[in-house]
Amino acid sequence: MEPKSRRVTGADDIGLHLLDWGGEGVPLLLLHGFGNESHIWDDFAPAVAPHYHTLAMDHRGHGDSDWDPKARYAHEHMVADVEAVTAALGIDRLVVIGHSLGGRIATLFADRNPERMAGLVLVDIGPDLDLRGVTRIRLEVESKQRPVFGSVEEYSRVLSLAYPAGRPDAVMRMAVHGLRLRDDGRYVLKMDPLLRGGGPSEEPELAEERERAMSETLWKALARISCPTLVVRGAASDVLSPDIADKMVDETLARGRLAIVPQAGHSVMTDNPDGFREAVTDFILSDE
């Protein structure tokens, strides 16, 4: 099942790219993580497209969506994009599945639009982050400072170091869709350099304060979310700790469930696609 590409105008008049698998059911919107793009869901989307109108969006600055000339990449702008896109598509009620950054955007969107939420799935993300994963992701972003490659295979080898548990076909797909061919025959990353650290660096103290404020905001948001919510954790995750996942489900979410996917780290859908598909479809198909 091949999706169709669509263009929709998001907030701030930013052009956003969507993949649309079609379907006549309740809309289901997939939101990828930082540095990824909508094809990260290619193994999963066909399993739910017969039941939901399945869409995946490239965040601004990622994939085939436009770069923001004013570098407005804060969470609030990405939440506004989701609101603008769903409004443009006439979507009143939906299920949202978000991984990592996309999960934080999904949490904030659900808090701001409770009457629109039919369900929520948060994939390996929570209000508090494991410092091991934060360090790894920072090093991964720094590795992308060399944005030009001689071939897709060359970039795939770089990605395989960042996604050591990822299936080779999934890693190659990330490489194919993460690059743009230049006129000189070389490949350049699609991701906006300002998201890859190409702009002025933030002072560590300011970054820590910003993350503390976001953590507080997200805990409060989770406590207000009333729709059925699944928290998916990769068993070997270095981003979502077991304690935080348990706190989200047992103490914070009104209708929370936890699924732990074996043989998977933070990038659950590329590390164990079958396990991820089983965990999520068991939740969203049982609640149709």
Image: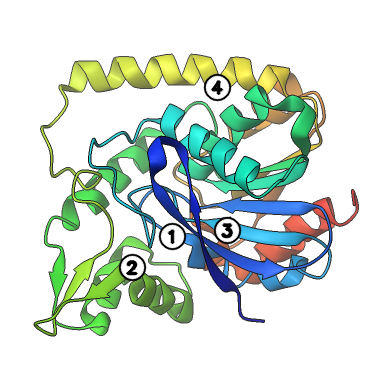
- The residues bearing labels 1 and 2 have C-alpha atoms spaced at a distance of 7 Å
Residue at 74 percent across and 56 percent down: it is: 280
Q: Quadrant of residue 198?
A: top left
Q: Residue beneath label 3, please?
A: 56
Q: Is residue 3 left or right of residue 69?
A: right
Q: Quadrant of residue 76?
A: top left
Residue at 52 percent across and 36 percent down: it is: 105
Labelled pair 4, 3 in contact (Cβ < 8 Å): no
Labelled pair 4, 2 in contact (Cβ < 8 Å): no
Amino acid marked by disc 2: Gly
Q: Residue beneath label 1, please?
A: 37
Residue at 47 percent across and 43 percent down: it is: 10
Mark 1 Cα shell of 10 Å, populated few (<14), some (14-19), many (≥20)? many
Of labels 4 and 2, the one closer to you: 2
Q: Position of residue 204 (x, y in %)?
A: 19, 22
Q: In front: 243, or 201?
A: 201
Q: Position of residue 231 (x, y in %)?
A: 68, 41
Amino acid marked by disc 1: Glu
Viewer can see residue 140: yes
Q: Residue beneath label 4, please?
A: 218
- The residues bearing labels 4 and 2 have C-alpha atoms spaced at a distance of 29 Å
Q: Residue beneath label 2, please?
A: 178
Residue at 36 percent across and 30 percent down: it is: 74
Q: Position of residue 113 (x, y in %)?
A: 69, 27
- The residues bearing labels 1 and 4 have C-alpha atoms spaced at a distance of 23 Å
Q: Quadrant of residue 135?
A: top left
Instruction: Looking at the image, tell me whether mark 1 or mark 2 is earlier in sequence order.
Output: 1
